[in-house]
Image: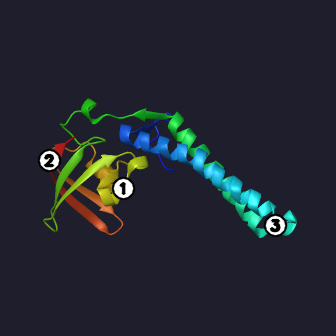
Amino acid sequence: MSETQNNGVVYLTRERLRELEQELHELKVKGRSEIAAKIAEARGHGDLSENAEYDAAKEAQQHLELKISKLEQTLSRARILDGKDLPNDKVYILSTVKLRDLKTKKILQYKLVSPEEADFEQNKISVTSPIGKGLMGKKVGETASIPVPAGTLTYEILEISR
């Protein structure tokens, strides 16, 4: 799980914090009981030394506990980000940015978020991604030339909002 690090702090929106808390609850309650049932069923199959079902269930339990631990660590360092607290004069985290691709002339819109919340399908890009880094600090009317593996993207900043 990646995260924005600043002295170990993970910056999340209130919505994402709720999603992670809900996921943790589901893993602890439903996930643990399902794994316990699988282990009990596998134990009922006899000799544990040659029981692949038991080994698989124990491995699944380890993965579940690791995921729970990582979520707990993330939540323990979480700080709420609120876009209303940030100015609109430049591109910052939680900015929604309308751009014109100067090569294709297409209009694009992205919301810059922490790596924890990035979801390209929802047009949420991480501030640590090449595009995110290239847009940070830019103002309306400025051009951003962003080197990416496929070449260089050049965008004109059309609008910044929250």
Q: Quadrant of the C terminus?
A: top left
Mark 3, residues whose alpha carbon is within 10 Å: few (<14), some, or many (≥20)? few
Residue matched to label 3: 45
Residue matched to label 1: 119
Residue matched to label 2: 159
Q: Is residue 47 above or below residue 132?
A: below
- Label 1, label 3: how many angstroms apart (C-alpha)? 43 Å
Look at the numbered disc 2 and give the secondary structure of its residue.
strand
Considering only order in the chain, which callout, 1 or 2, is on the residue closer to the N terminus? 1
Mark 1, residues whose alpha carbon is within 10 Å: few (<14), some, or many (≥20)? few
Q: Nearer the viewer, residue 75 or 131?
A: 75
Residue 64 x, y percent position in the rendering: 63, 52
Amino acid under disc 1: Asp
Mark 2, residues whose alpha carbon is within 10 Å: few (<14), some, or many (≥20)? some
Q: Nearer the viewer, residue 17 or 142?
A: 17
Amino acid under disc 3: His
Considering only order in the chain, which callout, 3 or 1, is on the residue closer to the N terminus? 3
Residue 66 x, y percent position in the rendering: 63, 49
- Label 2, label 1: how many angstroms apart (C-alpha)? 21 Å
Q: Residue at x 17, y 52 (%)?
A: 98
How did the renderer colour the structure?
rainbow
Task: State the image quarter where residue 94 is shown.
Answer: top left
Q: Residue at x 40, y 43 (%)?
A: 16
Q: Residue at x 51, y 50 (%)?
A: 1
